[in-house]
Image (cartoon, rainbow, N blue to C red):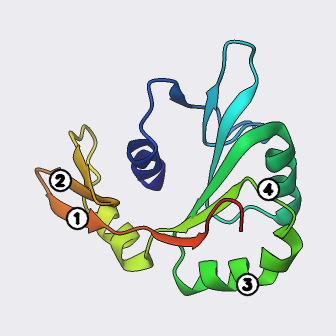
Protein backbone atom coordinates (compact mmCIF):
# COMPACT_ATOMS: atom_id res chain seq x y z
CA UNK A 1 0.00 0.00 0.00
CA UNK A 2 2.90 2.38 0.64
CA UNK A 3 4.01 1.76 -2.96
CA UNK A 4 0.60 2.97 -4.10
CA UNK A 5 0.86 6.08 -1.90
CA UNK A 6 4.35 6.81 -3.24
CA UNK A 7 3.01 6.41 -6.77
CA UNK A 8 0.19 8.86 -6.05
CA UNK A 9 2.42 11.41 -4.31
CA UNK A 10 4.95 11.35 -7.16
CA UNK A 11 2.32 11.15 -9.92
CA UNK A 12 3.87 11.51 -13.35
CA UNK A 13 2.92 9.98 -16.68
CA UNK A 14 6.35 8.34 -16.91
CA UNK A 15 6.34 6.85 -13.38
CA UNK A 16 6.10 3.05 -13.45
CA UNK A 17 6.13 0.15 -11.04
CA UNK A 18 9.17 -2.06 -11.56
CA UNK A 19 9.91 -5.67 -10.78
CA UNK A 20 11.10 -4.19 -7.46
CA UNK A 21 10.30 -7.04 -5.12
CA UNK A 22 11.72 -9.75 -7.38
CA UNK A 23 14.66 -7.85 -8.89
CA UNK A 24 17.17 -6.40 -6.46
CA UNK A 25 18.76 -4.19 -9.14
CA UNK A 26 15.58 -2.19 -9.61
CA UNK A 27 13.73 0.16 -7.26
CA UNK A 28 10.04 -0.12 -6.41
CA UNK A 29 9.15 2.73 -8.78
CA UNK A 30 11.10 4.76 -11.29
CA UNK A 31 11.03 7.26 -14.10
CA UNK A 32 13.34 6.72 -17.06
CA UNK A 33 13.87 9.04 -19.99
CA UNK A 34 14.00 8.07 -23.66
CA UNK A 35 17.72 7.27 -23.40
CA UNK A 36 16.99 4.81 -20.56
CA UNK A 37 18.64 7.12 -18.02
CA UNK A 38 16.98 6.97 -14.60
CA UNK A 39 15.48 10.31 -13.63
CA UNK A 40 13.75 9.21 -10.39
CA UNK A 41 14.43 6.14 -8.24
CA UNK A 42 11.91 5.37 -5.46
CA UNK A 43 12.60 2.84 -2.71
CA UNK A 44 10.04 1.69 -0.16
CA UNK A 45 11.11 0.54 3.30
CA UNK A 46 14.52 0.71 4.92
CA UNK A 47 17.23 0.00 2.34
CA UNK A 48 20.85 -0.14 3.48
CA UNK A 49 23.16 2.79 2.81
CA UNK A 50 25.06 0.96 0.04
CA UNK A 51 21.86 0.48 -1.94
CA UNK A 52 20.91 4.13 -1.43
CA UNK A 53 24.34 5.38 -2.51
CA UNK A 54 24.23 3.10 -5.57
CA UNK A 55 20.80 4.52 -6.45
CA UNK A 56 22.06 8.09 -5.97
CA UNK A 57 24.89 7.37 -8.39
CA UNK A 58 22.57 5.90 -11.01
CA UNK A 59 19.68 8.38 -10.81
CA UNK A 60 19.07 12.12 -10.92
CA UNK A 61 16.84 11.93 -7.84
CA UNK A 62 16.26 9.26 -5.17
CA UNK A 63 13.34 9.15 -2.75
CA UNK A 64 13.01 6.63 0.06
CA UNK A 65 9.56 6.17 1.59
CA UNK A 66 9.84 4.49 4.98
CA UNK A 67 6.85 3.54 7.10
CA UNK A 68 8.00 1.69 10.21
CA UNK A 69 7.48 4.40 12.82
CA UNK A 70 10.09 4.13 15.59
CA UNK A 71 11.91 1.35 13.73
CA UNK A 72 12.30 3.63 10.71
CA UNK A 73 13.61 6.42 12.92
CA UNK A 74 16.26 4.09 14.35
CA UNK A 75 17.16 2.98 10.80
CA UNK A 76 17.48 6.58 9.59
CA UNK A 77 19.46 7.74 12.63
CA UNK A 78 21.87 4.85 12.01
CA UNK A 79 22.64 5.69 8.38
CA UNK A 80 22.00 9.44 8.04
CA UNK A 81 25.62 10.46 8.63
CA UNK A 82 26.80 7.96 5.98
CA UNK A 83 24.64 9.66 3.33
CA UNK A 84 25.70 13.28 3.74
CA UNK A 85 27.33 13.36 0.30
CA UNK A 86 24.15 12.14 -1.44
CA UNK A 87 22.78 15.51 -2.54
CA UNK A 88 20.00 13.98 -4.67
CA UNK A 89 18.43 12.01 -1.81
CA UNK A 90 15.12 12.63 -0.11
CA UNK A 91 13.77 10.61 2.84
CA UNK A 92 10.03 10.65 3.49
CA UNK A 93 8.35 8.87 6.39
CA UNK A 94 4.78 7.66 6.34
CA UNK A 95 3.68 7.58 10.00
CA UNK A 96 3.25 3.99 11.18
CA UNK A 97 -0.31 4.49 12.43
CA UNK A 98 -1.34 5.88 9.04
CA UNK A 99 0.37 3.01 7.20
CA UNK A 100 -1.51 0.56 9.44
CA UNK A 101 -4.79 2.32 8.66
CA UNK A 102 -4.01 1.92 4.94
CA UNK A 103 -3.83 -1.84 5.42
CA UNK A 104 -7.46 -1.82 6.54
CA UNK A 105 -8.44 -0.66 3.04
CA UNK A 106 -6.95 -3.74 1.36
CA UNK A 107 -9.40 -5.98 -0.44
CA UNK A 108 -9.06 -8.66 -3.10
CA UNK A 109 -10.38 -6.35 -5.82
CA UNK A 110 -10.15 -2.87 -4.40
CA UNK A 111 -10.92 0.48 -5.91
CA UNK A 112 -8.99 3.30 -4.30
CA UNK A 113 -9.53 7.01 -4.74
CA UNK A 114 -6.57 9.23 -3.87
CA UNK A 115 -6.78 13.00 -3.61
CA UNK A 116 -3.65 15.01 -2.89
CA UNK A 117 -3.84 18.46 -1.39
CA UNK A 118 -1.20 20.50 0.40
CA UNK A 119 1.14 17.52 0.59
CA UNK A 120 -1.43 15.21 2.21
CA UNK A 121 -2.98 12.20 0.53
CA UNK A 122 -6.60 11.37 1.19
CA UNK A 123 -7.21 7.72 0.36
CA UNK A 124 -10.71 6.30 0.28
CA UNK A 125 -12.41 3.07 -0.66
CA UNK A 126 -15.56 1.17 0.27
CA UNK A 127 -13.71 0.17 3.47
CA UNK A 128 -13.21 3.74 4.70
CA UNK A 129 -10.88 6.70 4.40
CA UNK A 130 -7.32 7.38 5.54
CA UNK A 131 -5.37 10.63 5.56
CA UNK A 132 -1.64 10.26 4.93
CA UNK A 133 0.60 13.09 6.10
CA UNK A 134 4.15 12.33 4.93
CA UNK A 135 7.01 13.66 7.05
CA UNK A 136 10.10 14.84 5.20
CA UNK A 137 13.13 13.71 7.18
CA UNK A 138 15.61 14.81 4.57
CA UNK A 139 15.06 16.92 1.51
CA UNK A 140 17.26 17.26 -1.55
CA UNK A 141 20.40 19.43 -1.31
CA UNK A 142 20.71 19.35 2.48
Q: Earlier in the sequence, mark 2 or mark 4?
A: 4
Mark 1 = which residue? Answer: 130
Dot 4, how many residues are within 10 Å of its Cα: few (below 14), some (14-19), or many (20+)? many
For the C terminus, which image quadrant? bottom right
Dot 1, how many residues are within 10 Å of its Cα: few (below 14), some (14-19), or many (20+)? many
Labels 1 and 4 touching (C-beta < 8 A): no
Q: Earlier in the sequence, mark 3 or mark 2?
A: 3
Residue 58, above or below 36: below
Q: Tell which of 65 and 135 is nearer to you.
A: 135
Q: Compute the Cα span from label 1 to label 3.
A: 28 Å
Q: Is residue 92 left or right of residue 96?
A: right
Percent across and percent down for residue 87 are: 78, 58
| Residue 58 position by quadrant | top right
Q: Compute the Cα span from label 2 to label 4.
A: 32 Å
Which residue is depicted at the point 73% across and 37% down? 26
Q: Compute the Cα span from label 1 to label 4.
A: 29 Å
Q: Which mark is residue 124?
A: 2
Q: Earlier in the sequence, mark 1 or mark 4?
A: 4
Labels 2 and 4 touching (C-beta < 8 A): no
Percent across and percent down for residue 124 are: 17, 53
Q: Is residue 33 left or right of residue 125?
A: right
Circle 3 or circle 2, nearest the eye? 3
Residue 117, above or below 41: below
Mark 4 = which residue? Answer: 52
Residue 5, above or below 25: below
Q: Earlier in the sequence, mark 1 or mark 3?
A: 3
Amino acid sequence: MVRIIAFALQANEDLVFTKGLSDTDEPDLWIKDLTDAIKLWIEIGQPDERRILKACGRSDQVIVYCYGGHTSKIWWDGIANKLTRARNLQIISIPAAQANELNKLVERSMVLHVNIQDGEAYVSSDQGQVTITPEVWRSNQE
